[in-house]
Image: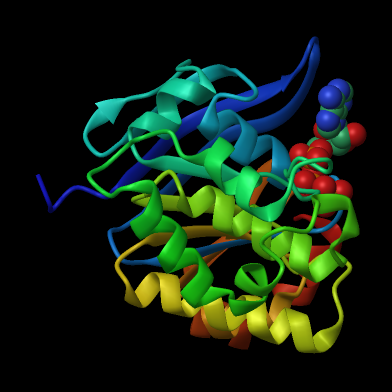
């Protein structure tokens, strides 16, 4: 039902082989909400998104999405349910054109045609329309990130997970990416955002979790977290 959170993570632990990375993570994303995950390098942010989308497998705990238990589900099953993971490092095909990249990302989920979805992506990112015949490798970092988000949107996500979409981009492009995130949210897509850009992410988000050494150290409404006196401390020391 609609009173349940869209995404609910309970007691999630995860790691690589015998190395444990995440321990007992509880996290929720409500419908229409932008939730931000902050934390220093190596905190486990990417591992957390991977464990939700099925790229990595959880060793304990449960992930529920839209009322279904998706613990242990494969990425291709998860994306079909409306949970799309836009992974770190621009997941695009370098040798395909912008247009071909979008074609390849259209999985026929939801009711919209390829043309309708492409039109939406081109409206959000006019530069992609201009460069529709350019191959991925010819695009700038910012354009590749836009294409990666465009590809994610071709799956008509209900919840979009973005892993450091502003990483390595010029300030002007970063500004544009955050504006797009807000626009997607207004259009009804829930967002789970991993960011190193703390102040900007807290401005854009509704709710925030601070992850350090595999555990949630602090969480609350983004405004409260931004004003939290222990934020810097929790960020650096993890305690
Ligand atoms: P970053 O901002 O650097 O990406 P992060 O918060 O996303 O950091 P993760 O990438 O989730 O952190 O990494 C968490 C821990 O897991 C780190 O100690 C990292 O070295 C380890 N790790 C990540 N990927 C693997 C892997 N494939 N095999 C083994 N250990 C890994």
Of the 4 image quadrants, the one containing the N terminus is top left
Q: Which of 213 and 50 is in front in this view?
A: 50
Q: In which quarter of the image is residue 226?
A: bottom right
Q: Nearer the viewer, residue 238 or 210?
A: 210
Q: Is residue 54 above or below residue 39?
A: above
Examine the rendering and report whether any part of residue 211 can be seen. Answer: no
Horizontal side of residue 42 vs 119, given as left or right: right
Residue 146 drawn at (x, y percent): 67, 65
Of the 4 image quadrants, the one containing the C terminus is bottom right
Report how many numbered discs are placed on residues in the image: 0
Residue 103 drawn at (x, y percent): 54, 42
Horizontal side of residue 16 vs 218, given as left or right: right
Q: In this view, does 197 lie above or below 21?
A: below
x 67%, y 33%: residue:
22
x 12%, y 52%: residue:
2
Horizontal side of residue 237 vs 76, given as left or right: right
x 66%, y 58%: residue:
147
Residue 95 drawn at (x, y percent): 83, 40
Horizontal side of residue 24 vs 88, given as left or right: left
Looking at the rendering, the quadrant in which ligand 1 lies is: top right
**Colour mapping used in the image:** rainbow
Residue 123 drawn at (x, y percent): 47, 76
Examine the rendering and report whether any part of residue 8 can be seen. Answer: yes
Residue farthest to the left?
1
x 53%, y 49%: residue:
152
């Amino acid at each position: 039902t609609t009173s349940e959170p869209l995404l609910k993570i309970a007691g999630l632990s995860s790691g690589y082989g015998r190395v444990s990375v995440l321990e007992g993570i509880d996290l929720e994303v409500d419908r229409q909400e932008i939730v931000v995950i902050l934390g220093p390098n190596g905190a486990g942010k990417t591992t957390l998104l991977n464990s939700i989308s099925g790229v990595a497998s959880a060793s304990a705990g449960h992930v529920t999405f839209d009322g279904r238990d998706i613990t242990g589900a494969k990425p291709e099953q998860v994306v079909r349910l409306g949970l799309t993971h836009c992974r770190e490092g621009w997941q695009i095909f370098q040798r395909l054109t912008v247009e071909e990249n979008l074609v390849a990302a259209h999985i026929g989920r939801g009711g919209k045609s390829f043309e309708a979805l492409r039109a939406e992506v081109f409206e959000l990112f006019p530069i992609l329309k201009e460069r529709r015949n350019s191959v991925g490798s010819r695009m700038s970092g910012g354009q590749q990130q836009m294409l990666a988000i465009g590809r994610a949107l071709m799956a008509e996500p209900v919840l979009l997970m973005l892993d450091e979409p502003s990483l390595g981009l010029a300030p002007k492009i970063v500004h544009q990416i955050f504006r797009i995130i807000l626009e997607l949210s207004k259009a009804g897509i829930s967002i789970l955002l991993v960011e190193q850009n703390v102040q900007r992410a807290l401005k854009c988000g509704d709710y925030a979790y601070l992850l350090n050494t595999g555990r949630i150290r602090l969480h609350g409404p983004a405004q409260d977290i931004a004003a939290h006196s222990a934020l810097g401390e929790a960020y650096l020391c993890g305690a």
